[in-house]
Image (cartoon, grey):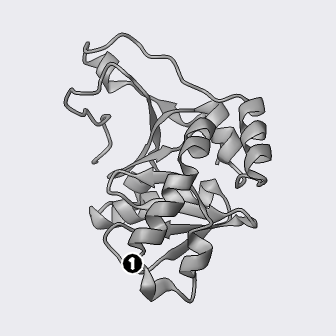
Amino acid sequence: MAFENIKIVNPYFEEGRTPEVKLTLATSDEVTAVEAELNLAFPRGYKEFVTTLGKGEYCGHNTAIRVEMPSEILSGYKKHRQFLDEYWFWEEGEDLLPKAKAIESIQICEDDVGDVVIFHPSNPNELFALPHEDDYSHRIGRDLYEALDWLVAEGSRAAGGTEESLKRRMFVPHDPLRYGREVIRPEGYYE
């Protein structure tokens, strides 16, 4: 998967509700600086995503995923760890991902139903999902590409999607003017 081939749509612009929004991208230097500060390497695909698509929603059938920008990871990783320590409820998946390892993790993205994707700094080639509605953790891939595919497949399965609908992907750039307005999903999002 190459992120430069993802269709970029802005339904707010298309509806005449906001001016066209440019992509909010991270630089390679920003990604490298956060890796150095946190003493880790991000999973394969992360740098490409934030420097090619950036801040916004990666959409597949019935699923919108927000990949955190480097600055968001840096400012939020301690809060993420504290939250997992206080509210850990994925006991059924302890053999796969023990709480002690999870609370040392880095959250890299989340979907629109509250499922989060994490990785442990010691192994960026092993990503896990902590579902909002399930007490099992799931190993979902070796990189961001596989993690995004897993999240989209789960959302599509829940909505009764087809093989064809599962293949459609798009990106809706972050639009600071849209907050407080109704959320418009891009055409083809639920088809």
Residue at image coords 35%, 76%: 134
The answer to whether residue 131 is above or below residue 109 is: below
Q: Is residue 114 at all visible to an observer of this figure?
A: yes
The answer to whether residue 117 is above or below residue 42 is: below
Closer to the camera in the image, 32 or 183: 32
Q: Residue 30: where, in percent of width, then height?
A: 72, 32
Closer to the camera in the image, 69 or 13: 69
Mark 1 residue type: Phe
Closer to the camera in the image, 159 or 38: 38
**Quadrant of the image occupied by residue 48:** top right
Q: Residue 107: where, in percent of width, then height?
A: 55, 56
Q: How many marks?
A: 1
Secondary structure type for disc 1: loop
Residue at image coords 56%, 69%: 103
The answer to whether residue 80 is above or below residue 88 is: above
Q: Residue 67: where, in percent of width, then height?
A: 52, 45
The answer to whether residue 178 is above or below residue 58 is: above
Residue at image coords 41%, 13%: 20
Closer to the camera in the image, 74 or 64: 74
The 10 Å Cα crowd at callout 1, few under 14, some 14 to 19, many 20 or more, is some
Q: Residue 127: where, in percent of width, then height?
A: 61, 66
Q: Which residue is mark 1?
A: 89
